[in-house]
Image: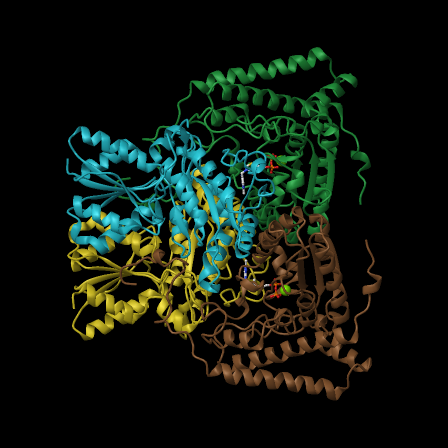
Chain colours: A cyan, B yellow, C brown, D green
Amino acid sequence: MSSITYLEAIRLAQEKALADDPRVFLYGQDVGNFGGAFKATKNLAKEFPGRVFDAPLSEDAIIGMAVGAAIEGMRPIVEMQFADFSTCGFNQIVNHAATLYYRTGVPCPIVVRLPSGGTSGGGPFHSQSMEALYAHYPGLVVMTPATVEDAYSMLLEAVALDDPVIFCEHKFLYYHLKSERLPESVLPVGKARLARAGRDATIVTHGAMLHESIAAATELAGDGYEIEIVDLRTVKPLDMDTVLASVARTGRLLCVSEEWPWGGVAAEVIARVTSEGFGLLDVAPQRLNAKDTPVPYHPDLWSVHRPTASAIAEVSRRLLNI
Amino acid sequence: MSSITYLEAIRLAQEKALADDPRVFLYGQDVGNFGGAFKATKNLAKEFPGRVFDAPLSEDAIIGMAVGAAIEGMRPIVEMQFADFSTCGFNQIVNHAATLYYRTGVPCPIVVRLPSGGTSGGGPFHSQSMEALYAHYPGLVVMTPATVEDAYSMLLEAVALDDPVIFCEHKFLYYHLKSERLPESVLPVGKARLARAGRDATIVTHGAMLHESIAAATELAGDGYEIEIVDLRTVKPLDMDTVLASVARTGRLLCVSEEWPWGGVAAEVIARVTSEGFGLLDVAPQRLNAKDTPVPYHPDLWSVHRPTASAIAEVSRRLLNI
Amino acid sequence: MPTFKEDATVSSSEFIKAYRVMLLARVLEEKLASLYRGGMIKGGVFLGRGQEALSVSVGLHLHKGDIFAPLIRDQAGRMAFGDTILDTLRTYLGSQLGPMRGRDGNIHRGRPREGYYAMISHLGAMIPAVSGALLARRMKGETGIVGATCLGDGGTSTGAFHEGLNAAAVEKLPLVLVVANNQYAYSTPNSRQFACLDLVDKAVGYGVAGHKVDATDLEQCLLTLRKAVKAAREGGGPQLVVGDLLRLVGHGEHDDAHYVDPALKSAPVGRDCLLLAEEKIIAKKWASRAETSAWRHEAEEEVNATVDKVRREPGPKPEEDDWMAYSKSEFAEHYAGA
Amino acid sequence: MPTFKEDATVSSSEFIKAYRVMLLARVLEEKLASLYRGGMIKGGVFLGRGQEALSVSVGLHLHKGDIFAPLIRDQAGRMAFGDTILDTLRTYLGSQLGPMRGRDGNIHRGRPREGYYAMISHLGAMIPAVSGALLARRMKGETGIVGATCLGDGGTSTGAFHEGLNAAAVEKLPLVLVVANNQYAYSTPNSRQFACLDLVDKAVGYGVAGHKVDATDLEQCLLTLRKAVKAAREGGGPQLVVGDLLRLVGHGEHDDAHYVDPALKSAPVGRDCLLLAEEKIIAKKWASRAETSAWRHEAEEEVNATVDKVRREPGPKPEEDDWMAYSKSEFAEHYAGA
Ligand SMILES: Cc1ncc(C[n+]2csc(CCOP(=O)(O)OP(=O)(O)O)c2C)c(N)n1
Ligand SMILES: Cc1ncc(C[n+]2csc(CCOP(=O)(O)OP(=O)(O)O)c2C)c(N)n1
Ligand SMILES: [Mg+2]
Ligand SMILES: [Mg+2]
């Protein structure tokens, strides 16, 4: 098997879900014959006739229809063309899908795929990281796969879950991230992963920021510092056991997140670590998010708007008191 | 002047804004002759003909129209019938109003009034506290007045600001909170207020939770503990100077917020305090939010779903190691 | 357009059946209003007085296995579809034994597993949900199914209405969307809500069938819904039914509806569909005045007995609730303090 | 319906003026496509090839003081309304001197202070914005103003379209909403987008005037927009204009549009409005082939010269940006690390 991209892993996971479970279907703009704006559903309409189809330009209806289909026992996977457009289907996600189980006892097994995060030139409306927004609402599972393996296995798990899943797949990783094979064994849903072992500080991160963090850690390794990195994988629920265990080892915490700072993943992780593991911290925990402005479209602005390996390395140095 | 309710203060502020500034107008469902679902615009349509009018049942259009009117130099105040329905106007708020200044340099002076928070029997769709959601987005000022005086003066300031303001007025305070007079001098926008002086611990809170926190502090005062309380007033921007100064005095921090925990105001405040004032903390900061489920409609469930004075007192005791 | 010659009348038994459900809904709602004034109700009370004829006609034409997503003013339609006095009172009185276990209430109640959907408050939102349910049924190979949902004149202004109806039309789903134009959305009159001459004029813009009915007239409602539901069931795609009527109560029981134009109250649209139906029964000699009184009495007895029973039922116990928004208990988060 | 007898022709000078703007837009967009292939463009490139006749007709009928919120495929309409080659290239090439200072780009550019609105990506969103602007103008006592905005066939499926047009209709605002039905929304054909026979059938459901035009025909476009804009300006309320045409490029320059039905390409709807307009000019002897070639050459010269100039302009400097989403600098938050 030749190497598989993150994007192809998502396509393969959907293909497997369709093949394995007759309750699965795909709905979204251009996901049918065209195979999706990013080709995440390429060939699937042909392979699974009547189960992969184009929706009108109606995010609210797309999610609403998925909710209804889920009540009837189906397992819809819906694609938003970009995460940013999910604001138009926001009400159905947070007020219908997310509340259904609590209110009625009937679960709502939908998967909403959000092509997320920044890419060069994407601009304010094709770059957003919306994981914190959805994680704020009770009832939603929010996944943020950072590797090809996780993109594949977590999407399959998302489909298997009875609860609604917001699946934040990162566009920056679509083409560049590659793997030789699909995973055989996987971590359970809600478990974070130790992406890199270290002893001097812990970086807690997710999504595309995992790779920036790894690059920063590599840079710092050159100076003799060993940074441990926790990839959250799902930001809700949060695997505090893994995070706290790492902080217990290192005593230092940096949270790196691409979404905006106020109330973001980094804020939540720091709040949790400090209230649950205050004594583990030797110094003030730090965070690094995107800047608190819309995501600029110009590549030169964008590349400093989001956290980069060099910015992460710089904050890490401060954290390490170098 | 007989005593003024929180709700009446909001009405009076709108009356004054309409009287003082010809650019101000009111738009929203039932805000015209009917005077609004909560009567926050009572008589204003009659007093200001052609400037207070009923909108169709269209939150997206209501906000969108306010944005357009603001570009043309007006100062619209729009009312959502309940904060919870702003999810249907979410896109215009976060992607249009919030981004306009950054993208084009043209400010977007709209005020979106959100009747917020829980009341007995309100249930999942008439009780939400959405301040954290909006604060996550760059470009929005998020106000959460907790007193009659602030309801009045902050709404006037909101209208005067060039930036879009999400004005979270708390329904629980509408009728019960009263004051003898309207404020003469006011704190500037973005400044928190020391609502109660103390030395043993700091509670940082906002909105209706201010009053639960005061009740808890009063209870603890009976045991000889002096709790300092900071009322944030605006949750974005956050007045960290006031918060940090208080924590510097007390060494102990409890954040109390009615919205959901994940990424809420409490999480943000704790993240800020620990990263900026770690050394000030003697013990782990704590937070108390609503439970992580939709807001239940039954009064007996609701009354334990949100933080109450007794729950706050209980967590405070743990914080004080009693 | 097909003509349904054989369908053009309503039998006395069908009419009486519908009338009795309307009457039961009316009696039950009068009780709810009285309990509300007595401070016995948990949450708000939004009644369907004056809208029973249209609502009941929806519920009566649905079968077991169909889908129904009622809205605010559908007590009659709910009961016609199988909801009970007991479930109704359990939600309003806050019994733990109700279908929503105290977590949500009143007009939001439902039993989704039985095709009886539990509305969220955001108007219009049930339209795509029912559409998606119908799509699911089609994918499962079920045929002859109908999904119905109701809406007010105000609800037609929502984006959800538009997107939902359009998507249903594209898929040619068997959706029956019933709009009760009661002239007001809370206090907002039609003139501030839309500018088309008639809401049914929207049908052509979606490519769906449109039906118009005088919703004070039970017979016309029954005939119109019979036709619309049949057309949907037989593959005719979405059906938009618009009924004209007047809300004969406040928006909710807290509202005195002083803003309602007196001219509307005295116009034909302001007539009470229940009274008209009763008059027809009498005029047609399908039953005597004594019989209709007995029916009302029977309904009152049943409602009162159920109130007595439900009042003795326990409310939800906070300490027994699992406080889980997830079906998987591993997903419970433990927030400090909470 | 009023007939505009005196308006029923387009003068040669008006036609040629429109043609030359279309030509300039076409030439500029061809350059953008070429720059895109050369990797010189920042952000995406979405072109309006085939849509110039409809688009230019909108821009040409607006005055200074009117409002225009163009969409993806409105290079021609933008230039007719006053946008320049310079501003266009500055955004696409990422010059700091462009109207959006590198913060947003390309089709999102605008100068709201001059009535030239800067679209957000979320389709439909500009409709209520223009409506609100018109409401504001009315409150300020300005009359005779028009606000126009454009949309695609796909955009009509959004809730924003519905809510915005309805609200404008209720307020009887002078809104001209121009729908370019180019048969596809990205890859999605009309058959998966709506079920009405024609999008103009939606007009009656909003109580607004509807206009239909063959959008490959410049003269018809000019006449139709003249009529619609005049009607709006004179108090006739919102005008819904639907033009049929075909997108003659990919959705964006990354897209080869292989999914476009060949039958559509060879149908009348698939004709190139620019070629048709040129043929008409020649046939009517309003200009010679040599003159039209000279016009094209002139446009190319100007575009090329501007590219040369803009390429030498600096891009935005991150360290000089104030990174403020607020107009009040006190509101800048200081997040640790950032
Ligand atoms: C999206 C949304 N916005 C606002 C409300 C608040 N609200 C509840 S009922 C109502 C009026 C509804 O009017 P209509 O649709 O005509 O139904 P009716 O009450 O007349 O039966 C409003 C505005 C809501 N439920 N949903
Ligand atoms: C609300 C929303 N959803 C999705 C998109 C992504 N998107 C951009 S253009 C497009 C197709 C638009 O089709 P149409 O409205 O027909 O305009 P055209 O591109 O054909 O001119 C889509 C789906 C968007 N911009 N906005
Ligand atoms: Mg109504
Ligand atoms: Mg199109």
Residue C199 lies in quadrant: bottom right
Q: Picture coordinates of residue C221 (x, y %)? A: 74, 67
- Residue at far right of view: C5
Q: Which quadrant: the C terminus of chain B?
A: bottom left
Residue A235 horizontal side relative to residue D251, left or right: left
Q: Residue furthest top?
A: D290
In this view of the protein, can residue C223 be seen by the observer? yes
Depth order, front residue of B24/B222: B222
Find residue A317 and report its horizontal and vertical position in percent. Answer: 19, 35
Most foreground residue, A76 or A316: A76
Give the side of residue D114 with respect to residue A165, left or right: right
Ligand 1 appears in which quadrant? bottom right
List the single residue furthest toward the bottom.
Answer: C290
Asked whether, in this view, residue C337 is left or right of residue B69, the answer is left
- On-image quarter of the N terminus of chain B: bottom left
Q: How many numbered markers are drawn?
A: 0
Nearer to the camera, B222 or C77:
C77
Residue B80, horizontal then vertical, whole percent: 50, 58
Instruction: Please say if C307 is above or below A74.
Output: below
* Residue C61 spot, x, y in % from top left: 70, 65
Snapshot quadrant of residue C110: bottom right
Task: Examine the rendering and report whether any part of residue B76 can be seen.
Answer: no
